Image (spheres, rainbow, N blue to C red):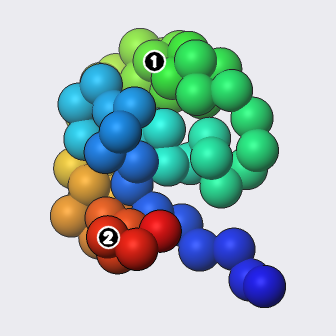
Amino acid sequence: MTKKLYRNPASKMVGGVCAGLAEYLDVDATLVRLIFVAVFLMTGLFPMALFYIIAWIIIPVPPSGE
C-alpha cells in the first residue's frame, strides 16, 4: 500500500498542512510545527508563508472513507 499525503483536518491548527506532513512522515505534529515556525522566522516570513498557502491549496483533504 502506498502512502499518500493529505491534509489532516482532524488535528489542524490552521489548514492541516503540518499535521498532514507529520502523519505522512510518521513523526509528531508538534515537531513539524516547531520546525516550520523556526524556518518561517529564519527566512523572513514570506517564503514559508507562500509555501504554506500553496501547500494548503495543493494538498487534498482525505476522502471521507479514510
Q: Earlier in the sequence, mark 1 or mark 2?
A: 1
In the rendered structure, the answer to whether residue 51 lies left or right of residue 29 reads left
Choose between 45 and 10: the one closer to the eye: 10
- Mark 1 lies on residue: 37
Q: Can you say whether 51 is above or below 38 in the image? A: below
* Residue 60 in view, yes or no: no
Q: Residue at x 65, y 20 (%)?
A: 31
Q: Secondary structure at mark 2?
A: loop
Identify the image quadrant of residue 45: top left
Q: Residue at x 74, y 83 (%)?
A: 2
- Residue 20 on image: x %, y %: 49, 49
- Residue 24 on image: x %, y %: 65, 55
- Mark 2 lies on residue: 64
Q: Can you say whether 9 is above or below 66 in the image? A: above
| Furthest residue toward bottom | 1
Q: Residue at x 58, y 18 (%)?
A: 30
Q: Amino acid at mark 1?
A: Val
| Furthest residue toward front | 65
Across the whole image, how many numbered discs are drawn on residues? 2
- Residue 47 on image: x %, y %: 33, 41
Q: Residue at x 39, y 54 (%)?
A: 7
Q: Can you say whether 64 is above or below 9 in the image? A: below
The N terminus sits in image quarter: bottom right
Q: Amino acid at mark 2?
A: Ser
Residue neighbourhood size for the residue with mark 2, other residues' Cα within 10 Å, grouped as few (<14), some (14–19), many (≥20):
few
* Residue 53 in view, yes or no: yes
Pointers 1 and 2 in contact (C-beta within 8 Å)? no
